[in-house]
Image (spheres, grey):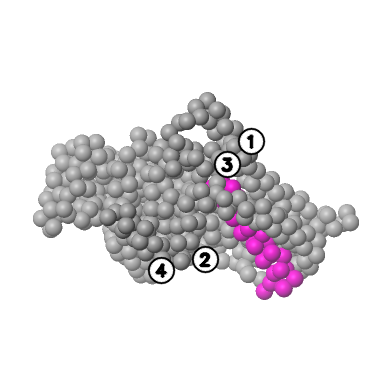
């Protein structure tokens, strides 16, 4: 089982590195969305520092969501997904492997780039550190919840907007706690409560989301 | 051999009286017949309860000393908000039953229930905002309960959008059931986080909406209205489910007989 | 009587809430009843056109 899991992860990673756009496009998207806000609101330091945490998190949310298509789409098109369903290994484990790869190619680069955007939005160093921790805890949750939504719409021709309707309301708790943690740390307040919540929610999602995703995949591929 | 074994095994499978009743009621034909008898009773009872509760709430319940007469919106707003949560639970449970035991009727119930729930959610939102205008001086305030209600409306809309996007009704029912179950697990988390977010951002402005120690003469119309809404929901749900059953079973003889009786 | 209907200064808010509830719930209730009629009509037409189509049961 571990062999199957790791070979799937390796294969997906190799595929992702072959099409570099799959890694770069969500990242560009993330940077561009954040850049739009100073242009749309104001370049003033105080304003940006206040709304920065929320904006960076909303952008991360959207970037993770628009990249969900790469999670199952190509495997659905070429029939690999059907083979996964028929394989002797538990589908939820294989799905978890795919979700981890999705996080590595979309969530992880966002974390690496976030200090840059934090600086651009005039966040303090503490706040940038917190931003990276919340992204580390939060972006996997986005991939996990998003996978459920993607599995539900993968067989549909025009699933794009529908996917956002299904997934965005479920992202709200992550957004609330993460952006609040960043804001609080900028004000010098304690943030352990928010981080505990995110960690608990992450563990909760790791346990249940792969099961829900594989159930949804079975429905979609019938 | 088979002819001998079958009646016995059938009897054994149906020995549990609860399951017998469920399977009997869940067969489309019997559902159609029984629900047809229930609907007039439920419908009239719901109408009477809602009218009585409205008159009681509008004219006989005493004026609130803080909010004046504007608090009378509570008799629509709060029961509607209760219904919006209750209906989502029904939708998810029916979806789960359909998913696990493959009872077709449960799928029909789940899919008939969504628009009614969305309507109640919308009603709770709009009446909340109308109530907010004299109380807060603004049509919309990012109050925890209103915001949670808005997110619930999004969940309903997502459910309905997914249902209409999948053509095969069987697959649509199963996909929607999964979505509803995921939603139900998430609703407490969303509510908790919205409430937490709200206490941080605006402390004192919303105390007027906090539970006042409600007087019994205000509680009676409130509970009557809540009961009336529940019965109204049951009535509309059955009518909608009957329509779907009839249409889905149109090639069966019992449907033709019903049509003959009614023409 | 008129004073009672005015609800202090809040008449417009209260009555519009109840009115909206009436309209919305009325629509939600009446729509499926109308659907029922149209389904009956559609099925009756279908059966008349093709009385013996794949009868089951």
Q: Mark 1 near mark 4, Cβ–Cβ under 8 Å?
A: no
Residue where numbered disc 2 is placed: B199
| Residue B101 in sight | yes
Q: Mark 2 near mark 1, Cβ–Cβ under 8 Å?
A: no
In the depicted view, which residue is nearer to us: A162 or A82? A82
Q: Residue B263 carries which label?
A: 1
Residue lying at 22% horizontally and 53% vertically, measured from the top left: A91
Residue where numbered disc 4 is placed: A189
Q: How crowded is mark 1: few (under 14 residues within 10 Å), some or many (20 or more)?
A: few
Q: Mark 2 lies on which chain?
A: B
Q: Which chain carries label 4?
A: A
Query: Which secondary structure, mark 3?
Result: helix
Q: How far apart are marks 1 and 4 (CA)?
A: 74 Å
Q: How far apart are marks 4 and 2 (CA)?
A: 16 Å
Residue lying at 65% horizontally and 43% vertically, measured from the top left: C30
Q: Distance between the residues labelled 2 and 3?
A: 57 Å
Query: Which secondary structure, mark 4?
Result: loop
Q: How far apart are marks 4 and 3 (CA)?
A: 69 Å
| Residue B113 in sight | no
| Looking at the image, residue A46 lies above or below residue A26 | below
Q: Where residue B90 sits: x, y (%)?
A: 50, 58
């Amino acid at each position: 089982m571990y062999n199957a899991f790791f070979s799937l992860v390796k294969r997906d990673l190799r595929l992702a590195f072959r099409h570099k756009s799959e890694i770069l496009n969500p990242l560009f998207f993330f940077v561009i969305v954040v850049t739009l806000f100073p242009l749309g609101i104001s370049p003033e330091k105080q304003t940006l520092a206040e709304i920065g945490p929320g904006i960076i998190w909303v952008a991360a949310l959207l970037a993770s969501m628009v990249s969900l298509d790469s999670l199952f789409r190509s495997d659905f098109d070429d029939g690999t997904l059907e083979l996964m369903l028929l394989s002797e290994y538990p589908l939820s484990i294989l799905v978890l492997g795919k979700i981890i790869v999705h996080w590595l190619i979309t969530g992880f680069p966002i974390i690496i780039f976030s200090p840059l955007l934090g600086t651009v939005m005039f966040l303090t160093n503490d706040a940038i550190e917190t931003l990276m921790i919340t992204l580390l805890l939060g972006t996997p949750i986005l991939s996990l919840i998003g996978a459920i939504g993607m599995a539900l719409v993968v067989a549909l021709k025009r699933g794009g907007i529908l996917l956002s309707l299904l997934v965005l309301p479920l992202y709200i708790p992550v957004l609330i706690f993460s952006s609040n943690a960043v804001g609080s740390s900028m004000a010098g307040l304690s943030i352990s409560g928010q981080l505990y919540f995110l960690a608990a929610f992450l563990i909760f999602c790791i346990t249940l989301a792969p099961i829900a995703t594989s159930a949804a995949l079975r429905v979609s591929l019938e | 051999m088979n002819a001998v074994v079958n009646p016995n095994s059938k009897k054994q499978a149906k020995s549990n009286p609860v399951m017998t009743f469920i399977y009997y009621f869940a067969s489309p034909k019997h559902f159609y017949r029984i629900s047809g008898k229930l609907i007039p009773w439920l419908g009239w009872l719901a109408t009477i309860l809602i009218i009585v509760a409205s008159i009681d709430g509008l004219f006989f319940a005493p004026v609130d000393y803080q909010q004046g007469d504007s608090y009378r919106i509570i008799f629509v707003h709060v029961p509607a908000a209760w219904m919006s949560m209750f209906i989502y639970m029904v939708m998810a449970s029916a979806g789960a039953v359909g998913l696990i035991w493959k009872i077709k009727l449960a799928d029909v119930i789940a899919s008939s229930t969504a628009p009614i729930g969305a309507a109640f959610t919308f009603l709770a939102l709009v009446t909340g905002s109308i109530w907010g205008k004299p109380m807060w001086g603004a049509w919309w305030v990012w109050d925890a309960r209103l915001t949670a209600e808005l997110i619930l409306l999004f969940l309903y809309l997502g459910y309905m959008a997914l249902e209409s996007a999948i053509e095969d009704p069987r697959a649509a029912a199963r996909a929607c059931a999964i979505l509803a179950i995921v939603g139900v697990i998430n609703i407490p988390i969303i509510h908790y986080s919205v409430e937490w977010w709200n206490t941080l951002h605006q402390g004192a402005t919303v105390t007027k909406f906090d539970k006042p120690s409600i007087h019994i003469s205000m509680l009676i119309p409130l509970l009557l209205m809540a009961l009336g809404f529940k019965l109204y929901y049951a009535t509309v749900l059955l009518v909608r489910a009957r329509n779907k059953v009839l249409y889905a079973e149109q090639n069966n003889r019992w449907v033709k007989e019903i049509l003959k009786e009614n023409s | 009587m008129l004073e009672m209907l005015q609800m202090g200064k809040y008449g417009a808010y209260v009555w519009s809430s109840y009115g909206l509830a009436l309209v919305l719930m009325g629509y939600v209730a009446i729509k499926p009843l109308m659907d029922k009629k149209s389904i009956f009509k559609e099925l009756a037409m279908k059966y008349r056109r093709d009385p013996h189509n794949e009868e089951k049961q």
